[in-house]
Image: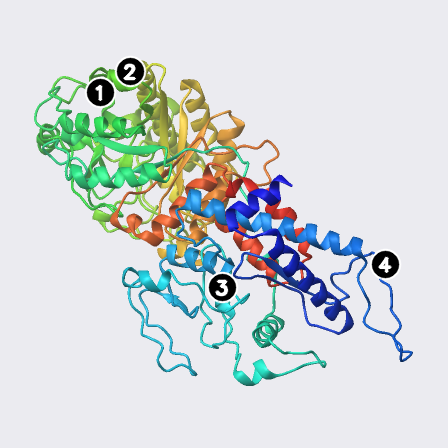
């Protein structure tokens, strides 16, 4: 009884209205049982009431019905026992209470401007407008950037206007009682789409002739519009499973979502750029419950002019803004340059004093077999060489990290800085710069080995002598070029030299240098940041993964051919230091933005499976980030499926997810709405659109009515 009282308060119906409406519905159900009607249809009228039209085969009540004889000896229409009428009233009250809660939840939590006696048409229109669509008073719906279709029977239909100019019209509800907007009487609405609902692509001709058509002797009277809708529904080939292909992540583990700040948020003078604009964007992110932001602390900015002279001014201002908004921080110690790589939109070189050293000693940079230097980061060959004004590269990195830890001690103590990612190579990733765009590499080239500076060659010769084969102290001469394919080389082709004695020796040494570099820097990072979580970033080199040699992985330093696990040594090293792994790989289905997956024989999903399982099996927490811009629901769904593997028996999931990156495109209304939905699902919350999508699908199919209400009751917390 409390439910009915609450419902009456919310939607303003009275008990007398209930009695009258339910008596009429009882009569209509008798009429339906007497004749043959089409498929069942749920509708909600302008009073927020749900009505059911069904036949005696699909929705039957199992109470006994009496046949009443007439004076003429025939049998009159069957009467309904009083007990069954009472059950009908209770069911109707139950349905109305659910509708009331849905509408109240939308008003209270979604800021939807719904009138007191709103109906489902108003809900659909509000959701469509929030997604950036224009909904006219007659229900015509179209994208805001297109032109409104003109109805064939209404030449006065206005052309499309921006949604901001249609506020007075949007406040009006559709005048069609019980008819969903995307099914009204125009065959032109074949692209109607609402957030979370399916798209109807075929064009259905619901003309006046079809509306006046009477099938199977059905009485039309005042139900011509309902008949039109049933005709449309019967014409559709409905596959509910295709519309509900998304997994429901409600109740799954909470995965924090961070958003990377723009690369140029701090300029070369270590000043915060456009603080007002950034503050506005951060407030928006906070409003959609993003957990925090990730920011690069650039070595080339902070220690730009002289050794051990650090300028943190811009970062102090930035971190204070983040703390005031009660957001968390993930910080990246960026010991590489920015610019020249995929999606780099600013140029931040290494410190000027390092560049001066490089002009006199270019071997401090990675070098390919043609002798081309790559100043993106320092060669790992100088990790223990005192060539940087009396310091080794490891000492330079440690001094930088220690300065940061001291300068921002209060942010560590307050828990604002939750994680520190340690830059270990190009783009901050633990890999060789084997695919430099500045040297002409293009996807899906295999890349080149980067071990030809004097310091790494010295290490290679030493390893060869220790093995007893001094002539092995040089790099392979048949490994192709940056844009070669594996089968075009003698080293990476099937049965090639990579499988021989020299090939195995060289690749073991090459990958061991990578692991040792990570081991040394992470040991210093653990010392500098003490109890704070430290992270190493690993890139997903997925192209040529389906070939035997895995050539692109080999040149990047991952000794991972088809007959060897190249990631176990890395995981053991991370486990040793208690470090987490940040793994980035191209999202499945999005690789074709770069090239045909078949051309590259790539398998990002297979690589992600191997790396994630290697880490999880070693007990290493794993974070993730997207490597390609993502604003679509399809892309977000794939990220979710990787972040929370649905069939994992151990319930493993990502430690956190970092979205790459904050931009005006993300702040677009439609994109932001989709991103907010993604954040909710990463947090394990139920999303309104998924519930309404299921609801609308049920309404347009032959699914039993009780199933719909059971589903809505299970997700009632969304509307409360």
Marks 1, 4: nearer the viewer: 4
**Coordinates of residue 619 in the picture (x, y in percent):** 51, 24
Identify the residue under disc 3.
199
**Coordinates of residue 69 in the picture (x, y in percent):** 89, 72
Marks 4 and 3, the one that precedes in the sequence:
4
**Coordinates of residue 335 in the picture (x, y in percent):** 23, 30
Marks 2 and 3, the one that precedes in the sequence:
3
Q: How far apart are marks 3 and 1 (CA)?
A: 52 Å
Residue furthest out toward the bottom: 209
Identify the residue under disc 2.
528
Question: Do labels 3 and 1 touch, CB within 8 Å?
Answer: no
SS category of the residue bearing label 2: helix
Identify the residue under disc 1.
404
Identify the residue under disc 4.
64
Q: Which quadrant of the structure image shows residue 679? A: top left
Q: Residue at x 35, y 54 (%)?
A: 670
Marks 4, 3: nearer the viewer: 4
Marks 2, 3: nearer the viewer: 3
């Amino acid at each position: 009884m409390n439910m009915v009282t609450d419902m009456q308060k919310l939607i303003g119906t009275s008990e007398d209205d209930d009695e009258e409406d339910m008596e009429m519905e009882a009569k209509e159900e008798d009429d339906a049982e007497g004749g043959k009607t089409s498929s069942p249809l749920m509708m909600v009228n302008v009073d927020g009431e749900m009505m059911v039209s069904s036949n005696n085969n699909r929705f039957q009540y199992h109470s006994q019905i009496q046949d009443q004889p007439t004076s003429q000896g025939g049998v009159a229409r069957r009467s309904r026992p009083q007990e069954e009428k009472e059950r009908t009233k209770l069911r109707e009250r139950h349905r109305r209470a659910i509708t009331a809660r849905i509408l109240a939840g939308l008003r209270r939590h979604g800021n939807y401007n719904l009138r007191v006696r709103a109906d489902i048409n108003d809900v659909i229109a509000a959701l469509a407008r929030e997604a950036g669509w224009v909904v006219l008073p007659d229900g015509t719906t179209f994208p805001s950037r297109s032109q409104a279709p003109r109805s064939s029977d209404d030449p006065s239909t206005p052309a499309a206007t921006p949604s901001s100019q249609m506020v007075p019209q949007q406040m009006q509800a559709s005048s069609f009682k019980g008819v969903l907007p995307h099914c009204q009487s125009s065959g032109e609405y074949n692209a109607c789409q609402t957030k979370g609902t399916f798209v109807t692509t075929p064009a259905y001709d619901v003309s006046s002739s079809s509306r006046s058509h009477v099938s199977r002797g059905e009485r039309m009277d005042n139900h011509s519009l309902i008949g039109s809708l049933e005709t449309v529904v019967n014409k559709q080939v409905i596959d509910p499973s295709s519309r509900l292909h998304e997994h429901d992540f409600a109740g799954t583990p909470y995965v924090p979502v961070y958003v990377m700040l723009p690369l140029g948020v701090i300029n070369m003078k270590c000043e915060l750029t456009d603080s007002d604009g950034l503050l506005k964007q951060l407030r928006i992110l906070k409003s959609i419950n993003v957990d925090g932001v990730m920011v690069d602390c650039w070595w080339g900015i902070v220690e730009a002019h002289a050794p051990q002279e650090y300028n943190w001014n811009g970062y102090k201002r930035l971190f204070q803004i983040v703390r005031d908004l009660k957001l968390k921080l993930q910080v990246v110690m960026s010991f590489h340059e920015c610019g020249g790589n995929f999606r780099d939109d600013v140029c931040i070189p290494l410190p000027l004093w390092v560049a001066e050293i490089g002009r006199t000693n270019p071997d401090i940079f990675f070098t390919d077999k043609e002798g081309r230097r790559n100043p993106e980061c320092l060669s790992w060959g100088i990790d223990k060489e005192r060539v940087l004004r009396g310091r080794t590269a490891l000492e330079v990195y440690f001094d930088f990290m220690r300065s940061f830890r001291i300068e921002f001690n209060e942010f560590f103590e307050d828990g604002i800085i939750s994680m520190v990612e340690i830059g270990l190579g190009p783009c901050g990733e633990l890999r060789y710069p084997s695919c430099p765009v500045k040297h002409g590499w293009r996807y899906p080239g295999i890349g080149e080995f980067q071990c030809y500076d004097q310091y790494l060659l010295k290490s290679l010769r030493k390893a060869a002598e220790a093995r007893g084969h001094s002539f092995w102290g040089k790099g392979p001469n048949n490994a192709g070029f940056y844009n070669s394919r594996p089968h075009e080389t003698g080293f990476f082709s099937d049965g090639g030299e990579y499988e021989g004695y020299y090939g195995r020796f060289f690749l073991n040494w090459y990958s061991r240098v990578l692991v040792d570099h990570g081991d040394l820097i992470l040991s210093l990072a653990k010392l500098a940041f003490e109890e704070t979580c430290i992270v190493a970033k690993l890139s997903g080199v997925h192209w040529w993964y389906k070939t035997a040699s895995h050539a692109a992985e080999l040149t990047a330093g991952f000794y991972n051919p088809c007959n060897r696990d190249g990631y176990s040594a890395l995981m053991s090293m991370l486990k040793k230091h208690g470090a987490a792994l940040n793994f980035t790989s191209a999202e499945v289905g999005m690789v074709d933005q770069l090239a045909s997956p078949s051309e590259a024989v790539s398998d990002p999903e297979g690589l992600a499976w191997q790396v994630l399982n290697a880490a999880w099996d070693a007990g290493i927490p794993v974070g993730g980030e997207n490597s390609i811009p993502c604003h679509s629901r399809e892309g977000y769904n794939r990220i979710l499926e990787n972040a929370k593997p649905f069939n994992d028996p151990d319930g493993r999931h990502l430690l956190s997810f970092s979205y790459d990156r904050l931009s005006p495109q993300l702040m677009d209304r439609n994109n932001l709405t989709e991103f907010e939905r993604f954040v909710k699902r990463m947090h394990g919350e139920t999303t309104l659109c998924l519930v309404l999508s299921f609801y609308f699908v049920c309404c347009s199919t032959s699914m039993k009515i009780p199933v719909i209400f059971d589903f809505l009751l299970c997700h009632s917390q969304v509307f409360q």
